[in-house]
Image (cartoon, coloured by chain):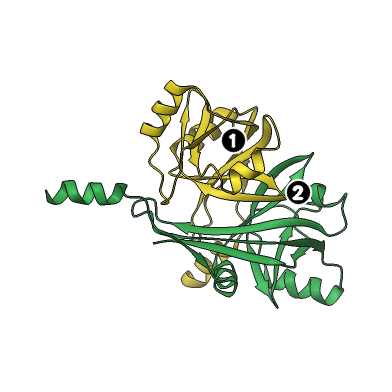
Chain colours: A green, B yellow
Amino acid sequence: MGPESAREDEGEPRHTRELPSAEALRLLAGASYGRIVFTLDATPTLRVVNHVVDDGRIVFRTHPAGGIAAGLAPFENAVVAFEADQIDAATRLGWTAIATGPARPVTDVDELVKYTRLLAPWAAGPRHAVIAIEPRTVTGMRLE
Amino acid sequence: MGPESAREDEGEPRHTRELPSAEALRLLAGASYGRIVFTLDATPTLRVVNHVVDDGRIVFRTHPAGGIAAGLAPFENAVVAFEADQIDAATRLGWTAIATGPARPVTDVDELVKYTRLLAPWAAGPRHAVIAIEPRTVTGMRLE
């Protein structure tokens, strides 16, 4: 019965618990990378980026002529989502956290210098556009 | 110089290579779970779901009164994205793949039975709505 029970247990759906906003933001801040969720050509899409959370804002660098910039350019303060998760495919335990709020290009020179230092892009190519998301809501879920 | 060079190498941005559509779909199919990207209350958002790729369609189960159902309900064939990725935070090597196309509730009884058997939901709660995405485009990127 041992191995069979273990298999059965793996197949059991996990209990989901909603996370307090502060814990969800802490998890987002600790993630190595996340996903910016936005609209491009009237279609919802996402891109993977490495980010920092600084003073409550989620900040990342991107290509000034890439998909993210193209998606955000038509709007001032386009509302976007930013997500990170960490779920173990074997145990099916983990968490997901998602922040939603307006995204704005960072234009202040001191801030640009600061974030260009803080953020080393993982992908090659020009990444000198810096975007900051101001979370209005942060939610999260833990599979346990 | 050894450890220092190694550190410098870790900090080097990775080369990104676009993946052929078939390879991106193969990676999506092999992923344990993915992220459905859609619009809810006029805001782009995503949810993590476990899925299967069957006959070229991406299929998953969801709560019939949950966020995904609420986001898709106002539209027939709402165009959504489905993403999976696998990136090693230490080496910064990996891939991301994203399919875009219309999403539809599965209503055929035989298909409902089939997918309910194929898909064991990871999260507890009613998950008897079955959604299928018909990819129109599949793109992907490898960090190498």
- Does residue B78 appear left or right of residue A76 in this picture? left
Q: For this rendering, which residue is in front, B14 or A4? A: A4
Q: For this rendering, which residue is in front, A97 or A62? A: A97
Furthest residue in direction left, as rendered: A1
Residue at 69 percent of width and 75 percent of height? A56
In this rendering, the answer to whether A121 lies above or below B136 is below
Residue at 61 percent of width and 29 percent of height? B135
- Element at label 1: loop
- Element at label 2: loop
Q: Nearer the viewer, mark 2 or mark 1?
A: 2
Callouts 2 and 1 on one subunit: yes
Residue at 36 percent of width and 50 percent of height? A13
Q: Which residue is mark 2?
A: B42
Residue at 59 percent of width and 27 percent of height? B134
- Give amino acid for label 2: Ala
Q: Chain of mark 1?
A: B
- Give amino acid for label 1: Leu
Specify the label residue B105 is tagged with: none
Residue B99 point in image, percent of width and height: 61, 35
Residue B57 point in image, percent of width and height: 53, 27
Q: Chain of mark 2?
A: B
Specify the label residue B19 is tagged with: 1
Residue B97 point in image, percent of width and height: 57, 40
Density class for disc 1 (Cα within 10 Å; few <14, some 14-19, many ≥20) is: some
Density class for disc 2 (Cα within 10 Å; few <14, some 14-19, many ≥20) is: few
Q: For this rendering, which residue is in front, A112 or B38? A: B38
Q: CA distance from mark 2 to mark 1?
A: 31 Å
In this rendering, the answer to whether B99 lies above or below B10 is above
For residue B75, what is the image quadrant? Answer: top right
